[in-house]
Amino acid sequence: MGKIRLLRKHLFVIMTIALFILVAGFRVQESGQLRAVAFTDVVIADEFWAPRMETNRKVTVPYNFKKCEETGRIDNFAKAGGLMEGKFEGIYFNDSDLYKVIEGAAYSLKIHRDPELEKYVDGVIEKIAAAQWEDGYLYTFYSLPERQPEKRWTDVQSKHELYCAGHFFEGAAAYYQATGKRKILDVAIRLADYIDSVFGPDKKRDVPGHEEIEIGLVKLYGVTGDEKYLKLAKFFLDERGHAEGHKLYREYSQDHKPVVEQDSAVGHAVRAGYLYSGMADVAALTGDTGYVEALERIWWDVVSKKLYITGGIGARGGGESFGKDYELPNKSAYCETCAAIANAMWNHRMFLLGGDAKYIDVLERVIYNGFLSGISLSGDKFFYPNPLASDGDYQRSPWFGCACCPTNIVRFMPSLPGYAYAQQGDVLYVNLFIGGSATIKMADNTVRLVQETRYPWDGDVKITVEPKRSGELTICVRIPGWARNEPVPSDLYYFLNESSEKAKLKVNGEPVDLNIDKGFARISRRWEKGDVIELNLPMPIRRVVSHENVKDNAGRAAIQRGPVVYCFEGVDNPQGVAKLVLPADTKLYTEYRSDLLGGIVTIKSQGEIPQESIEVVAIPYYAWAHRGKSEMAVWLPKSAEGGN
Ligand code: FUB
Ligand code: ZN
């Protein structure tokens, strides 16, 4: 009897130690972490983003669903679920498009209740649920015209089963969070559990050819708290570059080396951006320093050699991939809209790892330029590539056979409020300047920040601080790199002339030192309800030039004002853009045009065409291609003779 008790005691001690090792080894960081203020706690009420989010809700979401209906994307689920007859229609990863639209609809629903839309999405979810196999598998391409179990996981390099699953987890988590309805979440859990039963260290050791499931699994972990999903995400990350379990999928799929050994951005740009985002997610939760060090190396490679002035990434159409160092052509720039979104997602996560505003500088560059160009003002025309020059034969399209970009825009746009603020204990971060408010819950207080601004057209920002109770806290207000003579956090681009106009900060009308740390002005004090922070970011018009190794921009300059990059379009410059020269010393003027392209600041100047001086007009890059076919250029020669 005594022996058994002793044995039990030992067993208990051993199990306790094992549990401790397990938890410590797989540390899930909970407290003190830098967190984004959830988009649901942020209200956007400004002239710039609010109308775009409204267009997304009213036009882009229903339009995307309609396109998913018309192209058989929804019917594929109905057919796979036995609700109708027929074979698979479209591209093998079309399931993912519907999932992304559901995600976008979920964010929209959370911001703006819409019973009709919710009912519609519930109906779509019924069809998705019907298409799920008894063991949890879900992928309509292998479900039609009949289920083909022998094909499952036979080509995870190309067939995107795991990619689709990742988008499904993101959509399911978002819809569950928005509506509280479990149906879609339960389908997601069954699918994730099934995938977990197939893949793992002692099971199938393979990785998705297109990353995405890692992000989705982390989101599923977020809503369920089940660490199994976080571990599976880490497994998929760690298995990359290890040839034991699968034939390596090479650089194209970032599978050429273990992720912790990677040091440059290679291969397919969207895949890469999703991989880096997934690594940052897992690093934030587990404290994995190997990931962070690799991410910092790769990030530096991108910002110093592979980033377009618009924030776009992925120079080459061939392989939809990153080019070589400094390979940044303008007319043939691929800059896929999805890659811009992936870049924004990645930079936001990098910021959350260490609170450095340089990542938000890149994020901001993306959202005002290379992302926003991807969607028309009307909300129903899209760019897939976003070139920086055009002969006049390129326009937005109503849809694409491969519709990854429209369905990415529709989910990214309504998630934007979640990028604006962050919090770490009693330190609050104002990342983006967007009129509206944020309600930030702290351990023992709640603070509302109310922003008033006409950004990006004007650099004055007023932030009213409304703590529930007066108290000590630090408010970090981002001082953008462009306001510190640093267009990017590298030497890839620089302003042709330094500006002596400096950012200014006041609290309750009294000037305060900027006290910049990691790109943020830190204001620590006791805050009372109604205290006001005033930030003034001078917005002179700047000429930007490139590192000399960017051969395509030799002798050329681009124009930027605040975070907005400009371009010259044929419609405003009837003498043509191809031969236009903008001398480096001509004065540049702003003119606000409420009647043009949804309200924009235009830039005017005297340019040159052969033998003639003419007035030239630039518009924000994101707004081009709205007035018929037209030439376009972001980078213009600084002199007719060329040269630097
Ligand atoms: O393969 C899925 C998506 O389609 C990619 O992310 C895009 O680049 C497009 O190829
Ligand atoms: Zn795309």
Image (spheres, helix red, strand yellow):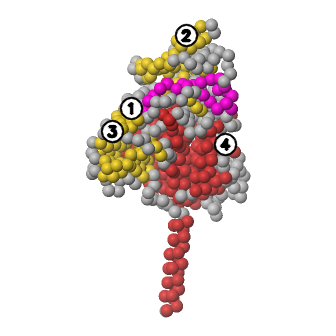
For marks 1 and 2, the one nearer the N-term is 1
Q: Residues within 10 Å of mark 4 (few under 14, many from 20)?
A: many
User: Magenta includes 541?
Assistant: yes
Q: Secondary structure at mark 1?
A: strand
The quadrant where residue 505 appears:
top left
| Segment tinted magenta in the rendering | 536-559
Cα–Cα span, label 1 and label 4: 39 Å
For marks 4 and 3, the one nearer the N-term is 4
Q: Secondary structure at mark 3?
A: strand
Report x, y in % for residue 240: 65, 53
For the point 57% across and 9% down, which residue is it?
613
User: Magenta includes 468?
Assistant: no
For marks 2 and 3, the one nearer the N-term is 3
Cα–Cα span, label 3 and label 1: 15 Å
| Disc 4 to disc 3: CB gap under 8 Å | no
Disc number placed over residue 224 in the picture, else none: none
Along the line of sight, which residue is nearer the eye, 51 or 224? 51
Cα–Cα span, label 4 and label 3: 49 Å
Identified by mark 4, the residue type is Val
